[in-house]
Amino acid sequence: MMERFENPESWSLTTPETHLELSLEPVPGGDGILVTDPIERHQFALSTPSVLDPEPADPDSFWFPADAAVRFRTDSLDLQSVVSVCVRDDEGQMLGQTEHYASESFPRATYSLELFAPVKTYVRVTAPLTIRSDAERTTLSFGEEAEVLVGARSHHKRPAATITTPDDPRSMMRAVSLLGSALKTTSPERSYPTLRGHPPLIERGETFRAPPTMTAPETGVTLELPATYRHVYVAAPLAYYLGATVVEGETPRLRTEDGFTYDLDTAAGYERAVERALKQTFFLDCLTRTEGYYQVDLHERRAVEERLDLDFADLYHRSLAERVAAYLRVPYDAVADHVPEWKLTTHVTPTPDNVELLPFVANDLAIVRTPRAKPAASSETQAAAVGDFLRSSSAGVDGVASGEDFTRSAAGTTPLPERTYVQPEETDSLEQAWVGEGTPIGASKASLQAYRNRLYRSPTEGDIGITVVCNDPKMADEREDVETVYGSRDSLPFDVQVQYELTRAELRDALASETDFFHYIGHIDGDGFQCADGTLDASSLTDVGMDAFLLNACRSYEQGMHLIDAGAIAGIVTLDDVINCSAVEVGSMLARLLNRGFPIRTALEIASETNVPDSDYLVVGDGGHPIAQVQGAIPNSIDIESKSESEVSLRYHTYTAAGYELGTIVKPMITGDSSYYLSSGVADTFTVSHDELRDFLAAEVIPVFENGTFYWSNNLELSQL
């Protein structure tokens, strides 16, 4: 018999996080349940044949933790989309997992169902069970009217406490040693994103303080590091994931209680050694966990298992320290080609004030680099980037030559103060972020305030709010386009407000009003946003109501940073003048990507792969923030590599998103293959028939690339390729 996951042996490592209770209420009309996460702004509907009168139920009725639950009677549940369903018996044994085009039946018994929906949802029922899926939705049938329990858990994570540390590196080692107190388990399942709690916050102070109830997990893993900011900062995500104790040592190394040691001072350098240790232990945990609660056919395990002298069934039941020792005895090159594309590399300047960023960096499992170069004014890098942007625009967009267009600056505007620029070194991560002084080129500008704003995001009831402000009638093309894009998804409720030529007072009110996304079209100069009666400087604002924004105007970087300081979570800004026709294309492309659930930083990355001249656009704040939930499970795209009269070869690419970070598994509904893949990056290359490709593209609206040409799947005919 499998013990419940929340038993003391596997679920007692952290103080429970504070969650605002999810809403499980009847859908309008009463024939179903609407599960709503008011923090993450996600929702999921379960329809029933008749009107319900649900009653509150015990959230502890499920195998995994739930924040809220209800009970009611029905003979079936119709899910609003195709949802992967994991089926367990009353003892927790996994009986199967269904996907698209499923038809599975189980005899009368007690079943626990886990629905991989936009809000993590659980169903418990005693009845015969049939699960059927087609290209559009999944239905759970019970063969009789039965009592059904539905529970849900928010993907939103909050830290349980705060650690105070002085500025010396030895005290910081004590603080980093406690990051692992947030792990919900030390089993390989912590490689799932929902089983890694948010690390405790760190703040600077005169003396070291931590709650007496906060203890690090006893994993038997220790990191010995020289007492420098650089060594501590780089190791923070690894220490968090391994629940490791960090102590001072002359030479950086990892050791376990059984005497195993792993050198972190290699020829590749300390930072690369830590990066490899994190990727390798995480990746092999993902393989080992297939022996546990989710026994799926994982592509990556099949791909590397024959290369490795590892007994995954035995390792699953070993201690964390024993697993780590076994993992790190494997040469990294044996697994490197199947490690998921890492979500994020964060470049952190090793100064005392940046210690407060470490919990957020660790929460993202980011690779940490410490830059050597200092920001410089009038950087040649910036000049080249802007030059590339202007050259790419000089030929015009959509047939408009540059001489016939205009920039989104205005004559006689107040100049901006001189900036300092820096270009972080390139990495193989999907995204890069910069923490420190200077304006980055090729990376987002991370901000401690933005992370804090996300953490304490207030719950919001009602539809997803989009505010579009167009303060120049000459830019109406972009306004008209994005007005039709936002809220174009039938299954999600949007409230789109469009405003024109606002005065300073009206714009101040618009910026203060609660909205999920603020899209500005107009002019910005050194004095601020240009309005009908003058300018409004965002530095004068103490509070703003938007979660995220796009300031599609010239030189909007400084105003965007002021919005972050005033309460926003993330935004997209410009570094220099932008030509209007190009800005229209950028704004329209980003609106479509954000509307489809792509996080802000990923949306800009994808836009950069098209013909959109985006090189002068920059993400500020927490670039992992999304505006809307994804239509399917996770954001994805395909690249058409080749085609014939009967077949198409394509690469399937997935991206991380809120609640679906590193460690998420996905089953591409492209062929009859039963394999699951780790997100993110290129899962595999598939060869499919034209009919199979049509069925796949009809299931969800996604980006499609062929030889650098971008398409949306719902507007694509195979004859176009």
Image (cartoon, rainbow, N blue to C red):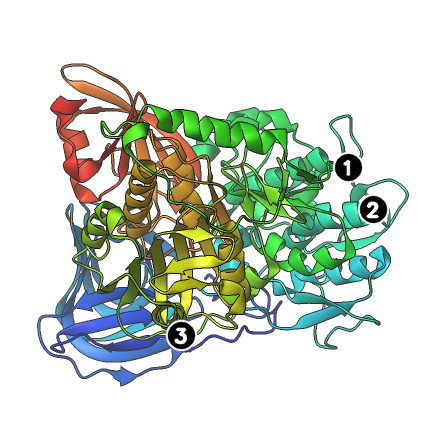
Give the left or right position of residue 545, taking residue 216 as reference: left
Q: Position of residue 488 (x, y in %)?
A: 18, 54
Sequence-wise first label, 1 or 2: 2
The answer to whether residue 483 shows anywhere in this view is yes
Q: Which mark is residue 183?
A: none
Which quadrant would residue 325 be assigned to in this image?
top right
Q: Position of residue 567 (x, y in %)?
A: 50, 67
Residue at 56% of width from left, 30% of height from top?
383
Give the Cα separation between the discs numbered 3 and 1: 43 Å
The residue positioned 47% from the left and 26% from the top of the image is 388
Q: Residue furthest top?
A: 644
The residue nearer to you, when weighing 605 against 38, is: 605
In three-dimensional space, the C-alpha distance between marks 1 and 2, rounded to whole angstroms, equals 9 Å
From the viewer's perspective, is residue 332 above or below residue 526?
above
Please tell me how crowded label 1 is: few (under 14), some (14-19), or many (20+) other residues with Cα within 10 Å.
Answer: many
> Regarding mark 1 in the picture, which secondary structure is present there?
loop
Q: Is residue 18 left or right of residue 204?
A: left
Residue ID for mark 1: 264
Mark 3 vs 1, N-terminal side: 1
- Residue 80 sits above or below residue 62 on the image: above
Q: Which mark is residue 459?
A: 3
Q: Amino acid at mark 3?
A: Pro
Residue 225 is tagged as 2
Q: Position of residue 396 (x, y in %)?
A: 30, 27
Tell me how many marks there are: 3
Q: Amino acid at mark 1?
A: Leu
Above or below for 364 versus 612? below
Q: Position of residue 507 (x, y in %)?
A: 36, 67
Q: Quadrant of the C terminus?
A: top left
Q: Amino acid at mark 2?
A: Leu
Mark 3 crowd level (few <14, some 14–19, many ≥20, 10 Å Cα): few
Please, what secondary structure does the residue beneath circle 2 have? strand
